[in-house]
Image (cartoon, helix red, strand yellow):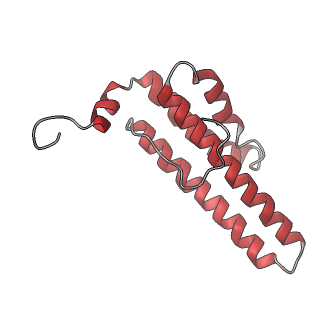
Amino acid sequence: MLNNGVMSTHQQQSRQLSDSERVPAILAHLATIIAMFVSAGWLSFVGPLVVWFMYKDRSEYVRRAAAGSFNFNIWAWVMTIIGWIMIFTVILLPVGILLLTIAFLMTIICHTLGAIRAANGEPFRYPAQIKILT
């Protein structure tokens, strides 16, 4: 609560969200991490995309969480592809390994933070995105 006894809009939003909104939002973030290990990263965009399709008209909160997760995954995919291309050129091997490492670590960290925020009913903004879904 603020000093004058009024709740901030963030507190109001987190109290208004039900489990039926929080759980899919959490899944939109965590699906990527799960897919990274199950499919070696090739299907990391599928989970957020499925959640987005299912909830795009039902919940703005879930839609935004899934869209952010999907858009961030596209950015991570681009970084990964560029990294692999650099690795195959051999000359740019160190830069390629650095890009792959950054994409991997940011994916794990950002999706984990997104899931934690979603569990608390808070929005999460990814630091890098290629905006495709809104």
x, y percentage for residue 49?
67, 33
Lateral position of residue 103 relative to residue 117, left or right: right
Quadrant the C terminus occupies: top right
Task: Check the image and name the residue furthest to the top.
Answer: 58
Q: Is residue 79 above or below residue 123?
A: below
**Total tally of numbered discs in the picture:** 0
**Where is 30 relative to 21, above or below?**
below
- Please tell me which residue is depicted at 77% across the width and 44% down the height of the picture: 39
In the figure, is residue 26 to the left or right of 134? left
Residue at image x 31%, y 38%?
A: 10
Image quarter for residue 100?
Answer: bottom right
Res 11 quadrant in image: top left
- Which image quarter is the N terminus in? top left
Relative image position of residue 71 (x, y in whole percent): 64, 44
Report which quarter residue 19 is drawn in. top left
Decide if residue 97 is on the left or right side of residue 54.
right
Q: Residue at x 57, y 42 (%)?
A: 68
The answer to whether 38 is drawn above or below residue 25 in the figure is below
Kindly give the residue lying farthest to the left in the view shown: 4
The residue positioned 79% from the left and 63% from the top of the image is 82
**Residue 69 picture location, percent across and down:** 59, 42
